[in-house]
Amino acid sequence: MTLKKTLAFFSAVTVSALLLGGCSLFGGNVKSAVLDYDFSEMELIQLQEPEEGRTAAVIKTSMGDITAVLYPEYAPKAVQNFVNRANEGYYNNTKIYENYEKLFVATGSSNDGTTGATDDGKLIENEYSPKLWPFKGALCAYSLTTGCFDSRYFFCNTYEEFTEEQIADLKGIQRDGEQLFPDELVNAWVEHGSLPNLSGFYTVFGQIVEGMDVLQKILDADYNTETYKPIDDIIVYSVEITEYSK
């Protein structure tokens, strides 16, 4: 399942149909991990002020710097792989290789997205948590293989507008006869921006805390409408691992 297919599918069917899966477009009966979440453990930590000293990454690009805090306690393998790749310089002078209809921008590959890297060369199984969601500015790990990731990552944007029908659909999704997504979560998606249809399909492991304007510049840059590559190269000069400070 690719990001493009997941996002494009959203425009053709309801969110509930996407989460419940069973579509051959995704290569079989693929269901979102959110169906197994214990929502009593939900905490919208991405919307909170990070604590001093939390591991963070400064992503230096030709459009400016983006700072994202990382969540190793909820996505340890994703954070460790990202940190290892950053520290070895793997991300240095790579490109933003995809801007998909201003919904997400993808990078993290030394060859324009064809492959990524891990410590042992093997893909890593996705990590999920009811504390992490694809809000605008979320940092997500992925690969082109369903359920796995490598060094490639993307930043979420948001749908420009959530229609009343979409909001009702989100609140109408049920599990065992009860509403699946709490109103608090749905309302936060709408208020803060999100790509809710990616929930439970990709590993969220970080959140932008500074440089959202830089992300917007990247999203607003012209791109090829067939390949989704930026017309003019947008370079990631480096990813520097540091500690968050207010």
Image (tube, rainbow, N blue to C red):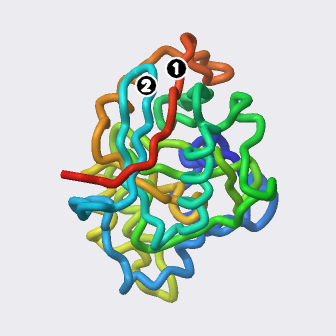
The x and y percentages for residue 105 are 52, 34
Residue 22 lies in what quarter of the image?
bottom right
Q: Which of marks 2 and 1 is in front?
A: 1
Question: Image point 70% across, 28% down: which residue?
Answer: 112
Q: Nearer the viewer, residue 20 or 192?
A: 192
Which comes before the other along the chain, label 2 or label 1? 2
Q: Is residue 118 left or right of residue 237?
A: right
The x and y percentages for residue 114 are 77, 35
Amino acid residing under circle 1 = Ile
Q: Is residue 221 left or right of residue 125?
A: left
Question: Image point 40% across, 41% down: which residue?
Answer: 58
Q: Which residue is situated farthest in the top direction here?
A: 232
Amino acid residing under circle 2 = Ile
Q: What is the number of the mark on residue 218? A: 2
Question: Image point 41% across, 63% down: which residue?
Answer: 170
Q: Which of 157 and 89 is in front in this view?
A: 89
**Is residue 193 positioned above or below 45 on the image?**
above
User: Which element is circle 2 on?
Assistant: helix
Residue 166 showing in the rendered view? no
Q: What is the number of the mark on residue 234? A: 1
The x and y percentages for residue 196 are 45, 56
The x and y percentages for residue 60 are 43, 31
Q: Residues within 10 Å of mark 1 (few under 14, many from 20)?
A: some
Q: How far apart are marks 2 and 1 (CA)?
A: 8 Å
User: Which element is circle 1 on?
Assistant: loop
Residue 87 showing in the rendered view? yes
**Is residue 154 positioned above or below 214 on the image?**
below
Question: Image point 24% across, 64% down: which residue?
Answer: 51
